[in-house]
Each structure stands twice: as structure tokens, then as C-alpha cells.
Image (spheres, rainbow, N blue to C red):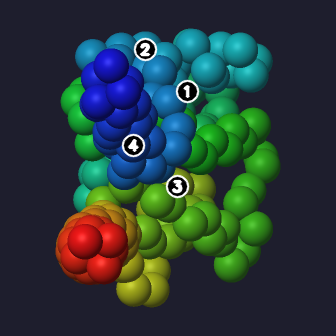
Amino acid sequence: MNQKVNRIITVVSLVVIIAVVAFFFNGTTVHDIQGNALEQTFLQTLSQNGMTAGIITKEENHFNSKTLFFENETGQKAVATYVKSIYGDRWKQVFFIPLNEGENIKKEGLLFPIDDHIFQYELKYEQMQNGQLTVSLTGEQKPIFTIRLFGLGVIVTAAVIGRIVGVWLGRNKLSRLMKENEKNKKDKK
């Protein structure tokens, strides 16, 4: 009975650990936008912010993220960046900036850090002289997924070594107890 309970606890613990690690690899966030509805979601977000009908003028991909640009006839512009889940075609909005007619991004641009679950980098959102919005990569890209895998490897290695040492120490203790037990039996005779 005790062994069954221990096995059940071990299996449940492993399932929980695997779920936590999977959630950790995906940036500990929920990606709630389906890939085929990404543009529609962007346009809905714009209408909720009071922007009238327009079109998506451009789309740029940077590693595991996608940036969409919007413009309409009244001069309103917007840009949004979405990050893709590593487990499928699901997305999450991580940056959004709407600009009404005449509004400008500050002269030096906006720097925004992006963690797309594979790389970590910085995007610079700028507005050119002609009013066109642009996005560019700046700085170095950190291989965040590789770092997370390395961390997981260190934890698994430590757990395996700990288990091996524990078993080895347990055997030594058991053999010592058996020797003492045999010695006690001999002493009693």
C-alpha cells in the first residue's frame, strides 16, 4: 500500500513539474490570439481605441515576433508587436502604440524589450521625416531559450546526482546496519 502511494505521489509530482517547466519555457504567459485571427484582433484593438477603418500597410517578422503597421485616410497610424507561443500558432500582444493625426513618436524613437521565448532583444520604434513608422532591431540578441534549457539541464543533473548519492549512502547505511545486526547475533550466542 505504501509503495502505491509513493508511486502516485511521484507520478503526480513529475506531471506538475513538467507542466511548470512547459509554462516557464513559454514565458509564463497565456497566448490568447489564434494565428489566423491576428490581423482581425489588431484591427479590433484599433477600433476600440477610436481609430476609423483603415488597412494594415506592412508586416515585419523579427525572430519569433510579428509587427503589424496600420494607417487610415485620416492620418491615424498604429503599430503593434505580437509574440508567438513556442507550442503552436497562438500569439500575445506585447507592444501597441496608436498615433492620431499630427502625433509623433519622440524624436529619438521608442526602445522596447521583447522576450519572444527563443530570443530576448530590443526593438526600436521610430517615425521617419515623411511620417512613416519603422521598426528595427537594436543591440544584442540573447538566446533566452538556450539559457533556459541549460538551467533545466543543471537542475536535472543535480537531481540525478543527488538521487545517486542518496541511493549510495542508503546502501552503505543498510550494509552497516546488517553488519551490526550480524555482530549482535554473534555476541548473543
Above or below, 38 relative to 98: above
Q: Quadrant of the N terminus?
A: top left
Q: Circle 4: is it few (<14), some (14-19), or many (20+) Cα within 10 Å?
A: few
- Crowd class of label 3 (few under 14; some 14 to 19; many from 20; radius 10 Å): some
Q: Pointer 2: what residue?
A: 40
Q: Residue at x 56, y 66 (%)?
A: 113
Observer-side mark, 3 or 4, equals: 4
Q: CA distance from mark 1 to mark 2?
A: 15 Å
Camera-side residue: 68 or 32?
A: 32
Q: Secondary structure at mark 3?
A: strand
Disc 3 vs disc 4: Cβ atoms closer than 8 Å? no
The amino acid sitting under disc 4 is Ile
Q: Which residue is mark 1?
A: 72
N-terminal of the pair, mark 3 or mark 1, is: 1
Mark 4 vs mark 1: give the one in front. 4
Q: Secondary structure at mark 1?
A: loop
Amino acid, disc 2: Gln
Please identify the residue farthest to the front as the structure is shown.
189
Image vertical order of residue 176 relative to residue 123, above or below? below
List the residue tagged with mark 3. Answer: 133
Return the disc, 4 or 1, that comes first in the chain's sequence: 4
Q: Relative to the observer, which residue lies in front, 153 or 99? A: 153
Which one is nearer the viewer's eye here, 58 or 33?
33
Per the rendering, the mark at residue 17 is: 4
In-front residue for pair 25/182: 182
Measured in 3D between alpha carbons, the distance from the residue under mark 3 to the one under mark 4, in whole angstroms, is 43 Å
Do the residues bearing badges 3 and 1 touch, measured as CB atoms within 8 Å? Answer: no
Residue 140 is situated, as x and y percent measured from the top left of the image, at 39, 86
